[in-house]
Amino acid sequence: MSVEAPPQTYFDRRIGLRLMPRSLAPRVIPALEALGYSLHDVDDDPELDNDPPSVWIVDDRRQAELPTIEEEPDLRLLVVGAPKLTRSGDDRIRARIPPPARLSTIFSTLQAILERTPRRTPRIRTQLPARCIHSDRRAIGAVLSLSEGGCLMRTSKPLRKGLRVELQFALPEFGLLTTGAECCYTRRGDVGMEFADPAVDVRQSVAQFVTLQLAELDRAGANQAYRSNAIHGS
C-alpha cells in the first residue's frame, strides 16, 4: 500500500517539535514523515533554535521554552494539552489539541496552515475487497484508496451520485467493517464515497489502519520525491 501522490507545488514543511512523553498518539511522527513533513525535535537538535521552523507542535508544558510573541511574532503553533491547562493570549496558536494528539487532527491543522488546497484527512492507496448494498441490490468491488472520512471504490455496477448505501470492506488486522456511505462523485467508473455517520469503532479502526500503513511506509524508506507530494490531491 502507498500514499496517494498527485503532483503539486512544493512548500516548506519543516515542523519543529517540543513534546513530552505521550503528547502524540503512537506512530504519528513516522506517519507525518511519510506524508512529506520534515520533523525536527529540539531535544535531538539543540541548534534548531538558531534556524527555527515557522511551524511548531508544542506540548503545553513546554510552550514557555519558545520565543515570546515579541521575539518571534510569525511562529505558528499547534499546542497539545488539556484545554484547562492551555495558555491563552498568544495569537500564534492555530489549534489546541488534547493529548494524545491523533494523526488526523494534526494533519488537518497542518494542511490548513501550509497547503493551498488543504485536505481534512490523510489517505492511502489500497486494494481492499468491498461490497455496496442498496435495498436488495449488491455491487461487488474494491476500495482503491481510504481515509478516515471516506474512500474511492471501483464497483462491478455503476452507482449514481447521491446514492446512499451500506458499505462493507475487509480491513487487515481489524476485520470486516460496515458503515453507511454516500456516493459523492464518479470518475472514470470509480466512485468517491463519504462515510455517513460511521460508528466510533469504524472511524477509529480506519484511522489506526491509515496511521499504521503510513508509519510502515516511512520505515520502508519510500522515494523522497514521492513522499514530498503525498499530502496533496483532490
Image (cartoon, rainbow, N blue to C red):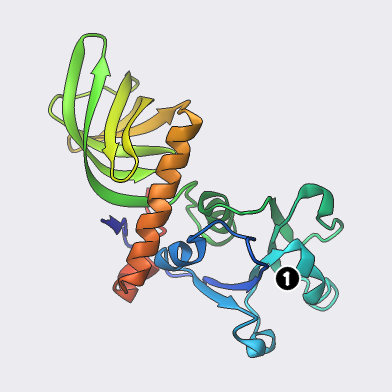
In the image, residue 49 sits, relative to residue 205, either above or below, namely: below
Name the residue that disc number 1 marks: 74
Of 177 and 197, which appears nearest the observer? 177
Q: In this image, 31 relative to 172: left or right?
A: right
Asked where in the image residue 2 lies, by quadrant, the reply is bottom left
Q: State whether residue 49 is above or below residue 1.
A: below
Q: Is residue 148 visible?
A: no
Q: Is residue 116 among the parts visible in the rendering? A: yes
Task: Examine the image and state in which quarter residue 69 appears.
Answer: bottom right
Tally of marks: 1
* Position of 109 relative to 196 (above/below): below
Q: Residue at x 44, y 45 (%)?
A: 207
Percent coordinates x, y for residue 103 in the rendering: 52, 54
In the image, farthest residue toward the top? 136
Q: Secondary structure at mark 1?
A: loop
Please tell me which residue is depicted at 56% across the width and 59% down the height of the picture: 110
What is the three-letter code of the residue carrying label 1?
Asp
What residue do we see at 65% from left, 73% from top? 54
